[in-house]
Image (cartoon, rainbow, N blue to C red):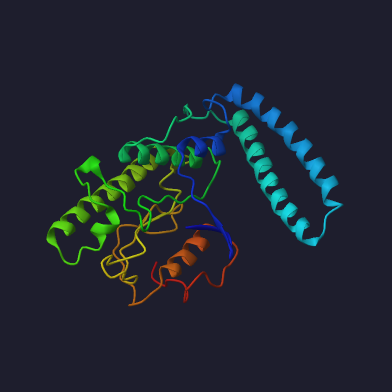
Amino acid sequence: MSWRGPNSPLPAEINPRTVFERLFGDGESTNPHVRLARLEKQKSVLDYVTDSLSRLQRRLGTGDKRKIDEYFDSVRDIERRIARAEEQSLTMELPQLEKPGAVPDDYLQYSKLMIDMKVVGWQTDMTRVSSFMLGRDGSNRSYREIGISDGHHSISHHQGSQENLDKLIKIDELHVAMFAYLLERLKATPDGDGTLLDHSLIAFGSSLSESNIHTHDDLPIVLAGTANGQVKGNRHLVCPKETPLNNLFLNMFDLAGLPHVEGFGDSTGRLTNL
């Protein structure tokens, strides 16, 4: 779902503990004093790694140098996160958050835990962009939490069966409830002269409108937040038939202040009525 470049997908991270460590380091909580001591240790390790890579790079061919360059990019990304974490430790009081343990078996508990870390990541400016799949395409997991033992993918090919449609509606309602939980958390989190929800823009939806036959147009998409007052809410917009979803993403890139992007995927232009 996320890509570093045209040919480099970013694998999804499903372990809450790993997400916590990526955002806040490998300590047991967001305690600022413990974080600062750990960051100093990480910086010394990175200095050693960078020096070793520089010496190695002088002895490599073109192909291997390219791989080393990619590794350098990863190191620089860690360095940027450390610098941001140091700044936060000095200028803001981080919300108290304990490192998660094992992956929860319960879907509600798992989803809320991942959403909570997303909100804290935005609140502390550890990241400004994130994606979260409430249900992976092709997954055949069951939702026993709401009394559904059948696989999601199997149910989605409902073939008009009312029993399957009723089950599919219950699963959709659960996913929407998790989206609502995210919005409630953002709305309850102060940020500058408003809330995190005021200053965010969140797209929620699916890549299919009719799962039974994999119809991928006329998608029902919810856009929440105002991107700091740039988007007017409480509207229902109907786009022309076969408008690519990627057209909306071009608008979102603009609202996020990214350099102008001519196209993205199968986009045909920007939405004109947003």
Give the camera-side residue of 81 and 147: 147
Give the camera-side residue of 184 and 62: 62
Q: Where does residue 261 sit, x and y in percent of width and height?
A: 57, 68
Give the camera-side residue of 154 and 241: 154
Q: Where does residue 218 sit, x and y in percent of width and height?
A: 31, 71
Viewport quadrant of the C terminus? bottom left
Q: In this picture, is 263 found above or below 127?
A: below
Q: In this picture, is 192 found above or below 91?
A: below
Q: Is residue 84 left or right of residue 69?
A: left
Q: Is residue 198 left or right of residue 222?
A: right
Q: Is residue 150 left or right of residue 163?
A: right
Q: What residue lies at 26% left-to-right and 58% top-to-bottom?
A: 154
Give the camera-side residue of 197 and 242: 242
Q: What residue lies at 42% left-to-right and 48% top-to-bottom?
A: 198
Quarter of the figure with residue 107: top left
Q: Is residue 10 left or right of residue 53?
A: left
Report the number of numbered marks.
Answer: 0
Q: What residue lies at 31% left-to-right and 37% top-to-bottom?
A: 106
Q: Where does residue 71 sit, x and y in percent of width and height?
A: 70, 49
Q: What residue lies at 36% left-to-right and 77% top-to-bottom?
A: 242
